[in-house]
Amino acid sequence: MILNSNRKIALITGAARGLGLQIAKELGVNDYEVVLLDRREELLAQSVGKLKDLRINAYGLGCDLSNIDEISSVVDDVVHSIGSPHVLVNNAGVNQVKPLQDVTSEDWDFVMDINLKASFFLMQAVVPFMSKGSSIINISSIAANSPRPLSVAYAASKAGLISMTKTAAVAFADKGIRVNAICPGAMETHLLGEMSESMGDISGVQPKQALMDYVGHIPLGRIGFPQEVAQSVVFLASPASSYITGQSINICGGLTLK
């Protein structure tokens, strides 16, 4: 194990692109060494290269989070070859856009395994190596608190992630480890684009219209940017949030005010 109390190491899942990559970049420019986990190894290598071009100490490890056995193994690899994480960001997430009555058992398990089960077992695997002052940030969604007829498993998994965040915050408080959740609204990511296409196919409208029907009226008048979520992650990872734990922060342009 590499021991150096001055190093700040952050482990981010689903980090080969989109929100996860932006979180890794934002942490990196704030003096964290970042470890990116993703099952898309070729894309992961490209993303790590881009971060290194920015003079960020970045590492990429391939991991299929649906395979629980891989989680403990990859955490051991991180700890012994890079160092003990100070920050864990459970960002990896998938969705199945289908009408509620068409959702299969396989669809349900696919979403739950990545969005909820993997996040739980990553926390379980990482916490023994974390020191006082460490932080876990779970990326949930505003979908956790509103009906999602075309994304029922996704919404349920994100609600479960909020519940798990609260429990973990209590469970790890005596270790000085804080656990919080961020709930993004509609963000300009690949996942949102894919959802828009699927929702458009189901409803028979153009993807852009399907997206606007989905998000409704956002008080700030626009879709969010991944950097706006990433900056909140940096805040929750830092000592500036040292008295915040067990909380869920909505980053949604005021959409939840409706």
Image (cartoon, grey):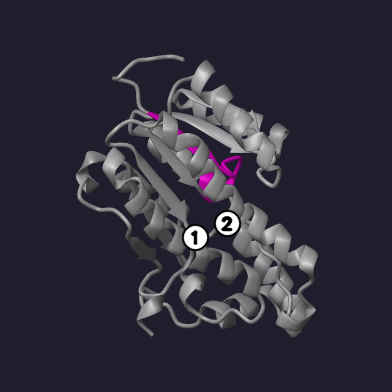
Secondary structure, mark 2, is helix
Q: Is residue 21 visible?
A: no
Question: Residue at coordinates 50% horizontally, 82% vertically from top-left?
Answer: 216
At a point 76% along the width and 80% down the height, the residue shown is 202
Residue drawn 43% across the image and 32% down it: 128
Q: Which kind of residue does numbered mark 2 sit on?
A: Leu
Judge by depth and name the residue closer to the eye, 99 or 179.
179
Instruction: Give the Cα separation between the discs numbered 1 and 2.
Output: 6 Å
- Image quarter of the C terminus: bottom left
Q: Amino acid at mark 1?
A: Leu
- Residue 231 in the figure: left or right of residue 203: left
Residue behind mark 1? 161
What percent of the width, then of the height, locates residue 199? 70, 76
Membership of 17 in magenta stretch = yes
Please report the residue visible at 35 percent of the width from the left and 45 percent of the height from the top.
172
Q: Which residue is mark 2?
A: 116
Question: Closest to the observer: 250 or 164?
Answer: 164
